[in-house]
Image (spheres, rainbow, N blue to C red):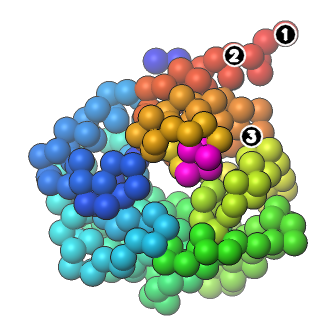
Amino acid sequence: MNELRTRIMGILNVTPDSFSDGGNFHDLTAALLQAEGIIAAGADILDVGGESTRPYAEPVSLEDELARTIPVIRTIRSTHSIPISIDTTKAEVARQALAAGADIINDISALLKDPEMIDVVRDSDVPVIIMHMQGSPSDMQDRPAYDNVIDEIVAFFTERIEWMTSEGVARNRIILDPGIGFGKTLDHNLSIIKHLDRFKSLDLPVLLGHSRKNFLGILTGLEAEKRDLPTAVISALSVERQADIIRVHDVASTRQALQVAEALMHAQ
């Protein structure tokens, strides 16, 4: 496969209630088959999550999240070298996932939910993804409001970066996710995507996680599982806006979109 500058993170939800594929890969056999497909399609990173963070999702116990994620990570690592990301806000899940073979921590709370997460991050040397979210999954879509969504997210990241580095985390380990759909309206999401390159002012990698999300349904009228085409369109547009990582469900269509977009960028 042609090498891409923008990395593709394939989503593996081992949950019964994620918004677009909840329950599809909840048992170990189905999860491993899906992981094989994601890897074969050309993903650069595999993101494993055991707790749904869709709007109004119910919290998951530590025991359930561990049972869903750790066997999957351990088995994938035994047969594949692909970098694995653990999508969690719980320090103990992150700790056990790293021990099982995970390479990246992906915390949608930006290390705010679990006070022990900073210890796990500090004691490891892996990259950590911090995301912006207004509110929590239980209330984030009630009434999201900003004076200037871009400026406020940049200010949030600036504060979190300063705090993490003061706690002993090397700055070059941090990856920024502006949090499409997490406490944002349609207009907020579109503004983030249009001005994605603004986050590059912080001189850190930027991840875009827009795959199949509700704003695409508002724009197109499509149900979640049918939003891969508009997802690929946004993925292609984000290349020129300097996205470093694209987090998606459909890796194959994203790879094709990025190949075209990057070829156009490099054309004379």
Write down the residue under mark 1: 268
Say left or right for 39 vs 222. Answer: left
The residue that appears at 56% across and 83% down in the rendered structure is 112
Residue drawn at x 65%, y 41% is 219
- Which callout, 2 or 1, points at the residue further toward the start of the chain? 2
Q: Is residue 216 magenta?
A: yes
Q: CA distance from mark 3 to mark 1?
A: 19 Å
Residue tagged 2: 263
Q: Nearer the viewer, residue 183 or 251?
A: 183
Characterize the magenta stretch by its predominant secondary structure. helix
Disc 2 from disc 1: Cα separation:
10 Å
Q: Is residue 245 magenta?
A: no
Which secondary structure, mark 2?
helix
| Amino acid type shown at disc 1 | Gln
- Residue type indicated by callout 3: Gln
Which residues fall within the magenta stretch?
214-218
Q: Is residue 231 visible?
A: yes
- Residue 242 is tagged as 3
